[in-house]
Amino acid sequence: MTDKIVSPMPRIGDRLAEVLVRVSHLRRIERKDGDGAFHIFKMTNASVQIGAVIWREAVDFQNGDYLRIWGDVRSYRDGIQAVVGRWELVPREEVNGQDLVPRCPRPLDALEADLEAAIAGVEEPWIRRLLEHMLLKDPYSARLYRLAPAAKTHHHPYLHGLLEHNLQVLERALGLAGSLPVDRSLIVAGALLHDIGKIEEYAFEGDSIEFTEVGNLTGHIALGYYLTRRAIERIEGFPSDLATGLLHILLAHQGRLEWGSPVEPKTAEAFIVHEADSLDAHLYQVTRTGFESPGQRMGFSRSLGRVVLGNPHLASASVYDYARPGAIEPPSDQQALL
């Protein structure tokens, strides 16, 4: 029997057969009419993270177990849900848990090539040396930086998600900078390092992505500040103004005190990285809503708390006629060229 990893996101109406998944968030739900119970859980593998339901009062598995499942994909609350009709409990020794951790859809070698090119293009030699050390050479931070997720659930919640997110933040930040008189080397470093603390905030080398104890108690901003300042202190002669400017970006990248930033942005570079970071996370939510509601043009994003246009390529269900009586005639071809 060959285990399967569903890819890409299944669509409503798809049938699932022999799909290997990890169980989490398992709950037994009592029916409102008092007539028995059923179970819900999240099923996860390298390419799928969706809710599942089993319409039975008793199951023989628990959180962290591996299942081989059969079922159907159906619509549920503006998204999709797997309705499991049959399952088999898979012995843990038969599964490589890392194979079931969600992974970035973009190949790692492509991400690494973009990272190396971004660092090579940094004009400020002190900043370039710091980035080379932390992200390319250091046996601890460089390895974990490539593997880490950007979050547990909110955005880019998969292996290599941190690297993907930071490269996208860099692209957006440089676009925002435009022709402004700002320090682009600081922007590159801030974009690539603002979430470096997540390599210690999350545990991700097992069969799931979880918060570490130090991540829960300290948070990625403090951890990232410490990792970066320690690296700076190891480079003799590193300019104080560059160190202060970069560390400020790391501390201020959440944007507001109530959002977790110890300080709010006070430099142009810090504002730019914060806005690029926020924009990338929000755009991820819009895109994810499209994936989670593949047959719908619009869907509800729980993270954003609103309905978003997740699949603009799908035909609109209704056409709004903006024309009104007395409207101006459309231009002729000749007028349009003027």
Image: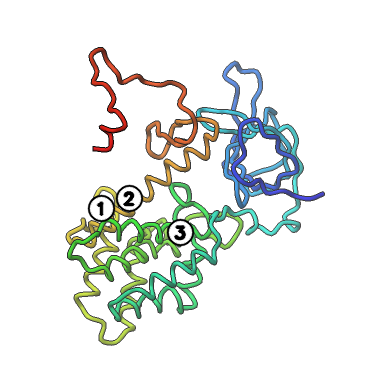
Q: Which residue is mark 2?
A: 278
Residue drawn at x 71%, y 38% as measured from the top left: 16
Which element is circle 2 on?
A: helix
Residue drawn at x 24%, y 59% as measured from the top left: 178
Q: Amino acid at mark 1?
A: Gly
Q: Position of residue 244 (x, y in %)?
A: 22, 71
How crowded is the residue under tag 1: few (<14 C-alpha within 10 Å), some, or many (20+)?
many
* Circles 3 and 1: CB atoms closer than 8 Å: no
Instruction: List the single residue furthest toward the right.
Output: 1
* Between 169 and 314, the one nearer to me in the picture: 314
The numbered mark, 3 or 2, whose residue comes first in the sequence reads 3
Give me the C-alpha separation between circle 3 and circle 2.
Answer: 15 Å
* Between 86 and 15, the one nearer to me in the picture: 15
Which element is circle 1 on?
A: loop
Q: Which residue is mark 1?
A: 255
Give me the C-alpha separation between circle 1 and circle 2.
Answer: 9 Å
Where is 237 relative to 68, above or below? below
Which element is circle 3 on?
A: helix
Q: Amino acid at mark 3?
A: Glu
Where is 315 relative to 206, above or below? above
